Every structure is written in structure tokens, then in C-alpha cells.
Image (spheres, grey):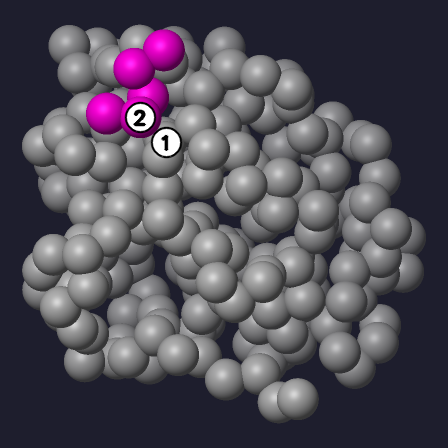
């Protein structure tokens, strides 16, 4: 069966609570699947979209697999119902998260979106285009990463949002709250690294399936 993205570029009137897990997925791996499933439960989400970036401005082109291959690796982890792989960012023609969110919120006006990010991404958020405006656009859920959590919790974004942190015990409220608001979801930490997967010979097959996961503590997992 040929995979087909069923999320319409033009949007629709669906009413849902949807987590957005964006990334290069170079390749997608079980770490992505684990945090997506955890977000579904912890935040009371209807879906998580694995939103494959056509080209992350903060990552070098060298070593980046073709978009179709990265998308296929994300699709291999999705079930198409609650966990959905999508190329909608490529179809929208956006490269920056802030711009992507603006278009998604316009096209899906009844959806409560939550941005999902690892502690490593949250720690370096000040490098992102319009990062402060991004935090005022959508609620954010931060997932733990080995060796990155204190850096994230003491970083620029956490300092900027010190007044807007939601206790993890109230995380299910997050999708319905008006930003800026964020929460950190403590729990089992996943050290799977896309970099290490590539170094160990992953991403060689045409279907884009990731190699067996490793247990390294690298912070790069997207």
C-alpha cells in the first residue's frame, strides 16, 4: 500500500488537540515514537503529527538524507490514526517553525496545537527565528533528554517563560491554555541518537527504515 498524507494543505474544521513533533527525522527512530506516545497520554492529545522538515535551517545539508527517505522513515513509525507522519511543512512552503505554526493555525482554526520538543531543542531555542513570538503562539511541552535537562531548565527560553510554567501534574490542561505556557514532562529519558544510527550504518535501505536504536547519550535525536 502506498503511503499518502491525508492532512489537507488547505486545512479543515476539525476540532482536536494535536501535538506537533517537528524535525529532520534523519532518520526517524523509536525515540521519536516513544515521546510521541508519551505526549498522547500525558497531554491528553487526539493525535501527534510527525512533521518532517524539508530542510532545517540550523542543520547542515551534508549528511542529510533525501526528504522522501526521511519521510518514509517517519511513516514507518506512525499508525496513521493517532500517530501521523506528514509532509505538510513542505507543502506549505515553510522552513521556520514560527511560520509553519502561523499557517497551521490559520488553516485549522478549531485545533488546539501543542509544540513538542526535546530538552536539547528547548535549550537552544534562542537560535530559532522569532523564538519569543513562537512561545506566544503555541503551548510548548518539553521532553527530557540525557545530559540536556538542566541546560534547558536554566536556559534563555525557560528564563523568559519562568512565569508561565505549568506543573507537570497539570499537563493535560496544556492544550487548552492560551500561550505563553509550557511544561516539562519528567520521566524515563531516551538517549537514542539519529547521528549514531547513521554512524552505525543506518538509513541505507530504500524504505528509509532506521537501524536498531542505540543507547548513547547524544543530544541530537531529530
Magenta extent: 169-173
Asked if residue 216 is positioned above or below residue 1 in the image, the reply reads above
Residue at (43% x, 27% y) in the render: 42
Q: Secondary structure at mark 1?
A: loop
Q: Secondary structure at mark 2?
A: helix
Return the disc, 1 or 2, that comes first in the chain's sequence. 1
Q: Nearer the viewer, residue 175 or 219?
A: 175
Viewer can see residue 132:
no
* Residue designated by label 2: 172
- Packing grade of label 1 (10 A; few <14, some 14-19, many >=20) is many
Q: State which quadrant residue 148 falls in.
A: top right
Residue 98 x/y as whole percent: 22, 52
Residue at (62% x, 47% y) in the render: 33
Asked if the magenta segment contains residue 191, the reply would be no
Q: Nearer the viewer, residue 22 or 176?
A: 176
Residue at (19% x, 47% y) in the render: 112
* Residue designated by label 1: 43
Amino acid at each position: 500500500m502506498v503511503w499518502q498524507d491525508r492532512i489537507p494543505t488547505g486545512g479543515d474544521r476539525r476540532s482536536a488537540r494535536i501535538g506537533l513533533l517537528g524535525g529532520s527525522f534523519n532518520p526517524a527512530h523509536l525515540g521519536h515514537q516513544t515521546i510521541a506516545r508519551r505526549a498522547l497520554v500525558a497531554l491528553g492529545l487526539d493525535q501527534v503529527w510527525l512533521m518532517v522538515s524539508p530542510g532545517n535551517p540550523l542543520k547542515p545539508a551534508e549528511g542529510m538524507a533525501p526528504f522522501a527517505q526521511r519521510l518514509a522513515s517517519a511513516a514507518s513509525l506512525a499508525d496513521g490514526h493517532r500517530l501521523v507522519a506528514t509532509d505538510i511543512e513542505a507543502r506549505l512552503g515553510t522552513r521556520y517553525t514560527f511560520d509553519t505554526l502561523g499557517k497551521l493555525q490559520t488553516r485549522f482554526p478549531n485545533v488546539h496545537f501543542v509544540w513538542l520538543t526535546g530538552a536539547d531543542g528547548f535549550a537552544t531555542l534562542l537560535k530559532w527565528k522569532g523564538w519569543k513570538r513562537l512561545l506566544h503562539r503555541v503551548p510548548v511541552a518539553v521532553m527530557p533528554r540525557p545530559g540536556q535537562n538542566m541546560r534547558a531548565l536554566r536556559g534563555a527560553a525557560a528564563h523568559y517563560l519562568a512565569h508561565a510554567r505549568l506543573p507537570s501534574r497539570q499537563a493535560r490542561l496544556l492544550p487548552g491554555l492560551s500561550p505563553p505556557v509550557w511544561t516539562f514532562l519528567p520521566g524515563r529519558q531516551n538517549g537514542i541518537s539519529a547521528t549514531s544510527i547513521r554512524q552505525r550504518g543506518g538509513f541505507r535501505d530504500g524504505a528509509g527504515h532506521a537501524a536498531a536504536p542505540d543507547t548513547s547519550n547524544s543530544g541530537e535525536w531529530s
